[in-house]
Amino acid sequence: MKYKIAVASENGVVTGHFGHCEAFHIFDAEAGQIIKTEIVPNPGHRPGFLPNFLNDMGVNVIISGGMGGGAVEIFNEKGIEVIVGAEGNSQEVAEMYLKGMLKSTGSVCNHDHEH
């Protein structure tokens, strides 16, 4: 099974808020091993934009500390697995996911953002 895992990161560590992360660490994995790593700067937080941006890149798993409900819904519509409540080093978290050791805690942020 091939995976393209995006981890919302800040200085190589999983960030608490998906939309405001510094960058996405993108890990291409095959047969349970990471075969390619790429760092993509966050192109900017706009409602509904980032899930589509990551989907267009071929991401099929997103890992973050927390995420708003709107983003979760868009990822779900696109068939992208959402893991929230993760902490620690971005690559270690992606490796834990590949080993089946990372489960979503469901910590969805319920912010009332003013737009």
Image: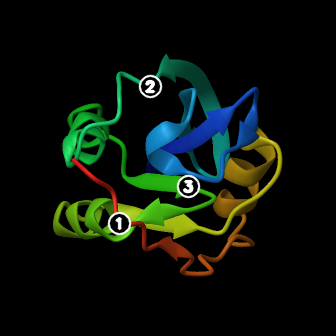
Q: Position of residue 25 (x, y in %)?
A: 58, 31
> What's the CA distance linking mark 1 and mark 2?
22 Å
Q: Which of 82 and 31 is in front in this view?
A: 82
Task: Identify which amino acid the numbered label 3 is placed on.
Answer: Ile
Give residue 34's position: percent from left, percent from top: 65, 37
Mark 1 vs mark 3: in front: 1
Out of 52 and 1, give the one closest to the viewer: 52
* Residue denoted by label 2: 42
What amino acid type is highlighted by mark number 1? Asp
| Percent position of residue 80, x then y | 32, 60
Q: Nearer the viewer, mark 2 or mark 3?
A: 2
Q: Which mark is residue 63?
A: 3
Residue 45 seen by the camera = yes
Measuring 43% from the left and 73% from the top, which residue is drawn there?
110
Of labels 1 and 2, earlier in sequence is 2
- Dot 1 crowding, Cα within 10 Å, few <14, some 14–19, many 20+: few
CA separation, marks 2 and 3? Answer: 14 Å
Q: Is mark 2 on a helix, strand or loop?
A: loop
At 34% from the left and 35% from the top, the residue drawn is 45
- Give the quarter of the image for residue 59: top left
- Under tag 1, what secondary structure? loop
Disc 2 residue type? Asn
